[in-house]
Image (cartoon, grey):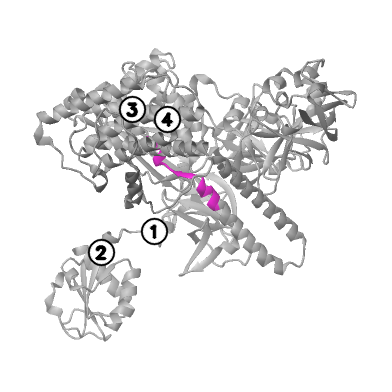
Amino acid sequence: MMDELINDFIAETRDNLESLTSQILNWEKNPNDSESVDSIFRFVHTVKGSCGFLDLPRLLALSHAAEDIMSEARDGKILPTKSLVSSVLSVVDRIAILTNAIETKQDVKDNDADLIADLYKELEGARTSEINQPSAKPTDSQSPISAGITIDAIEEKPVEQNDDIIEMFNNPQEVSENKTIRVSLNLLNNLMSGVSDLVLARNEVSRKLNEVLDKSDVDVVFGRLTASVSEMRDAVSLMRMQNIDHLFSALPRLVRDICEELDKDIDLKIDGGEVEVDREMIEALRDPLKHIIRNAADHGIESKEERIAAGKSPTGTIKINARQMGNQILIEIIDDGSGINLNSLGQKVVGTKLKTPTQWDAMSEKAKLDMIFSPGISTAESVTAISGRGVGMDVVRTNIMNISGAISVENNEGQGLKLTLSLPLTLSIIAGLSMRCGDQMFAISRNSVQELILKNNKNVSIEEIGGSKIACIRGERFPYARLSDLVGIGETAEQSYNSRTLVVVKPALGKSYVIDVDAVIDNEELVVKPGAPLLMASGLYTGTSLPDNGRPLLLLDANAVADKICINNADNVTEETSDEDKKSEEAKLSSALLFETIEGEQKAIRLAVLDRLEEVEAKYIGKSGGIKRVKIKEKLYEIFGLKEIPDDGIVKLLRLSDGERWKFLAVKEVVDIIKLDENIAPSLYPEQTEGVLTLDDRQVELMNPYQFFEHDTAVQVNENQKPLCYIDSSDNDDWSNKMLLPLLNAAGYRISTDKEDAQNADVILTLEGENNHNEFDADNCVNLRKNMAANENENSIYRYDRLGLLAAIEEKIAKG
Amino acid sequence: MENLFLVVEFAGERVAIPSHEVESVVRVENIVSVPGASPVIAGLFALRSRVLTLIDTQYLVTQESRTVNKGDFCVVTEIDGHPYGLIVDRVEDVVTVAQEDLMHIGFANGKWRAISNGMITHDDKLLLLLNSRSLVKVEIQTAA
């Protein structure tokens, strides 16, 4: 019984501690913020109450002292000075340490009395300073809870405020809208694997069902089972999600400590704390993020003097933005410090012999910046206690890569630095590409796959030099190896040499390479399971996965395979990478995908807008509102190039992206990737066809992707940015309600019939018969008439002339 | 005090595994081999939603890989959070052994020494006591 209570106490205290630090800092910033003071008070008070009950004397003494301070603060008797806040923080830290110690059953030998004495000393100091500046007395923040509590400073007294505790629980602020319960992580993991079992069992049943001929009655039930199983799987994976706030909660304190130590003023702004991520991700990001912030605060943000001299505000700013984009989480860390001085970075790089001066000069700016991720390079001018020893960004990058994320730098010398972390939504599910090699299946993370190309493609040739093989794809050379050789599978009878596929892999580190596999099978979401140590020792795999067919799948480690091919010549990895990046970027811009349309015609589209090829069952495609759409992961996307929706079977769709939105283009077959040269003949309809290519004496149209994004039905214009249309009619005018309103709405206008809005309206519509034409300024007024034929001298538009009407409105808005 | 052991046979020897280490005994099917990895790994096998790493126990003793066939027995055990299947030739029974019949002395020779940590007497016969944790140690495989 007692154990259970203590465990509850530990868990609860720990939860509260997380938010407490930021509350204390908030209090320091806004001494009059009674809400922060109240919640700090409430915390120490609750700890004190529980400790008395659970017989934890040290925690009791600490929380009691803190409670004294907070009580005075709440009564407005003291203001938070920097040193007072520090003392409170150290007491809170000690509470955290002791709380952990209860759980681990370890002894903490530090002396609490010193801390408590410090605290009271600061309290005295705070009182005096308050007397010295009486004008700064904060408004009294008396809350109903505090009534009746008088706290006599140092004297120990029994716990007797049980009434107050009850009162606090009744405080509506304390009752959260979302009720939650605490569940152990183990239980959650059990549930997860239970659900995975369920999914596999379902798949098994599905396979068995397919063998039975007459199953119409079972099908309905089975469909229901399938639906609820997948619903359950989604719910369980949501349970693993945690607010990214948990990751950020420790940062304000970190920044404050650094500021104090280095005498800087830094404002930390955190945005996007509501983004949800996998809890394992939060754990994995904690240290790298701390490191980045520490770097930014220490040698990103300059000292106050330097900032003033540079014409900046003496207070530096570090901004953290988190947002979700597609299936990625982006975290940006932006500081307004000095940025990276490439010259001094260059000196360091040359100084540490990572590069020769000539090499350095030849590097692109991006490649130079990337050098901050090399081991041994520090961006700091001097080593401080906090950072600058050169062990840092390389570790950060490795950590980020370990969770299949990426980090990029944007330097604005003198003005600041922006680091962007892009991370997968969860750690446990990756988009994988499965491939066959002999009778063996492997998978590789799709993020690292640059291109797939058939070996018999005429743009591909394999060259042999000095005993190693090089694949040449459209003039670009890559190290080449057969997967079967790499993993040591004996050569299998090569039934169909022609259909072999080359996979161009771009590992997180180093140069791209090509592996030769029998066939690429599928693109699937794979649940990654960590491999046993013995398996990982092979250095080839990152883990295993269990796809729907129930056969374990080995996940290849793109970096490890690169090592096996022996291409990572440490000397010039970074440089080559950057060149490579540029090259592949260029290659992307100047290449196009050749495909066969549903009608059987060959067309091309630039590779740059292409995301991937998606194969979708026809049943997920539907036509609504005159637009064909496909349902992918609960969302609808527009499809082009599909005249008829097939009854069943698979439809191949190219996923196009303009960077923000996705559109799909139906194709019959993907033919090849071709290189675009200058010889593109112009087209008469540039909006549909960018130009015409000649390919083996055939003419192929290069489609203009613009057309797919141009008329976007999914554009979410901010309500307030839509032009406002005021319709001057009585409220119950049938025609304007039934006809005009929907028309304008669909055309993207805001509509009002409220006279008040007439002033601000971008355009005013008046109706014949409502006879108040002259009331409005003709400049932004459109008159509608009932008859097709116009009366003489009347500037009006027939109300069923849709195009004319919309054009007139547009014209008026453009003028305004 | 009495202890429960599962008696199995592999590499021609009768071996006892502490029963608390044994999760279940199953017949393997659909083995996926792991090319490029240590020969100790006999393959992967999906037991419901878990992927077991199959351990070729015979290889650890004789340095000769055995072929694993569908229907062979494996002892399912979890070590350091990873599920393993120890391939065995035969599964006998669960036996109760009195504390005094349990000897934590290494008599075994050769490769057996690395993977056993004592022996037990049961029905007047000596059985090796398996140290299953040692089977999956990376050092053992690299040394092997």
Locate residue A89, reporting x and y percent.
31, 29
Of residues A134 and B101, the one drawn nearer to the viewer in this rendering: B101
Locate residue B129, reporting x and y percent.
79, 24
Chain containing the residue with disc 2: A
Q: Residue at x 60, y 23 (%)?
A: A566
> Alpha carbon of mark 4 to alpha carbon of mark 1: how far?
68 Å
Locate residue A164, reporting x and y percent.
32, 45
Of residues A797 and A470, the one drawn nearer to the viewer in this rendering: A797
Question: Is residue A548 at all visible to an observer of this figure?
Answer: yes
Local SS, label 3? helix
Which mark is nearer the camera, 1 or 3? 3
Magenta region includes residue A238:
yes
Q: Who comes first in sequence, dot 1 or dot 3? A: 3
Question: A750 left or right of B110?
Answer: left
Q: Residue at x 24, y 34 (%)?
A: A28
> Do labels 4 and 1 touch, CB within 8 Å?
no
Q: Who comes first in sequence, dot 4 or dot 3? A: 4
| Label 4 in the same subunit as label 2 | yes
The circle on residue A723 is 2
Which mark is nearer the camera, 4 or 1? 4
Q: Which residue is mark 3?
A: A91
Question: Is residue A302 at all visible to an observer of this figure?
Answer: no
Chain containing the residue with disc 1: A
> Alpha carbon of mark 2 to alpha carbon of mark 3: how far?
57 Å
Magenta stretch in the rendered image:
A234-249
Q: Is residue A197 above or below residue A212?
A: above
Local SS, label 2? loop
> Alpha carbon of mark 4 to alpha carbon of mark 2: how far?
65 Å
